[in-house]
Image: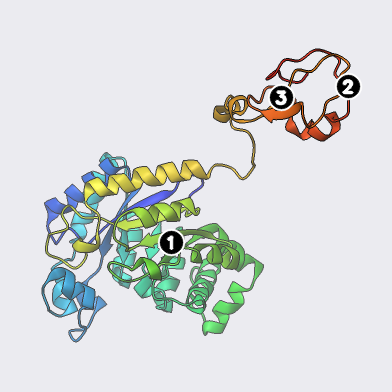
Amino acid sequence: MNNTNKTLIIAEAGVNHNGDKQMAFDLIDAAAEAGADVVKFQTFKAHKLVTQHAQQAEYQVANSGKKESQLAMLQALELEQSLHFELQAAAEANNIEFLSTAFDDDSLDFLVKEVGVKRLKVPSGELTNAPFVLKHAQAGLPLIISTGMATMSDIEQALAVIAFGGLNPKSTPDSIDSCWQAYHSEEGQSFIQQNVTVLHCTTEYPAPPSEINLRVMETFRRSFNTQVGYSDHSAGIAIPIAAAALGAEVIEKHFTLDKTLPGPDHKASLEPSELKQMVDGIRVAEQALGVSVKSVQPSEFKNSFVARKSLVATKPIKVGETFTKENLGVMRPGSGLSPALYWQMLDTVSNIDYQVGDLIE
């Protein structure tokens, strides 16, 4: 999916537009100015996403300062379909990719068939929604899946559904067993490895550092042989930068124009200046990853003569005199004979005169 060594940075605007059109445009501007690669929103029809009985999560109540049903909260955060095209055009004008996460079938069809997004994101809450995951896989686009609240078996089952959908773009499985058969096939594994990025995620806002476990990304690499990344809900920018240093190919992070705005996600989001700091930090981290071959770097070569040592005379030595522990030592600079030759030089005869501090030739 991300065919360069550059980390794909997704600036998650989500619902932080608060239902305000101008704020949505301002979020795109901020993401672009920060240097993110993708700006992502959320597309849904509230009445298709939750029942009237669904309650808010604790963090939603705490962050918004308002207790209401999920339905009421989400209805105020819907993006009109027509606005998607304007936002996409604004993103293109800012040289940043427009993306949105779908939360229902109609919204997914709209994003794929009408908006024409370049990739799809399966959010953590939909990972176990097998029919919806299948619909994503059958859309024929690269997939990013978030794994908050998931076990390894949850993730593997989602990948099994994706394998079936990738191999059967117009068929419905008879049962989950059909998905597992596709998953264990060579073709199914190939499809997953070429088309899926698995994001580690801890679904809490903000997520406590002690529960983030970035090493899980390496478990994903070994287990699934896919590209891996990290969807961050922690406070600040240290943890996503650390994830990039561990080789995350994708980093996703919520951002807002102002953390003090009312709404469920603002308090756990970065403000524009922080988003830019995160992007800059990730770019430094990905540069620092470099290659896996240990070699003397161009910038440090000149310093080896200063920092390393050579064999030197610690006492005057005359021609024909024997090198001993008393007259042969090791000191800077490093432009002479290597100290590794110390033992073989002992008891040999000098063929020239040396003064104290002279490099042995």
Residue 191 at x, y percent in the picture: 57, 62
Q: Secondary structure at mark 1?
A: strand
Mark positioned earlier in the residue sequence (3 or 2) = 3
Separation of marks 1 and 2 at Cα, in angstroms: 70 Å
Q: Residue at x 27, y 63 (%)?
A: 42
Residue occupying the far bottom of the picture: 53
Considering only order in the chain, which callout, 1 or 3, is on the residue closer to the N terminus? 1
324 in relation to 54, above or below: above
Residue at 12 percent of width and 78 percent of height: 67
Classify residue 222 as left or right of residue 110. right
Front residue (pair 348, 207): 348
On-image quarter of the C terminus: top right
Residue 132 position within the rendered picture, expressed as x and y whole percent measured from the top left: 39, 74
Q: CA distance from mark 3 to mark 2?
A: 16 Å
Q: Is residue 309 left or right of residue 262?
A: right
Q: Alpha carbon of mark 3 to alpha carbon of mark 1: how far?
A: 65 Å
Q: Is residue 295 visible?
A: yes
> Which residue is tagged 2?
349
Q: Which mark is in front, 1 or 2?
A: 2
Q: Which residue is mark 3?
A: 314
Mark 2, Cα crowd under 10 Å, few <14 / some 14-19 / many 20+, is some
Give SS at disc 3: loop
Measured as percent of width and height from the top left, residue 178 is found at 57, 80
Instruction: State which quadrant residue 314 falls in.
Output: top right
Residue 71 coordinates in the image, percent (x, y) = 17, 77
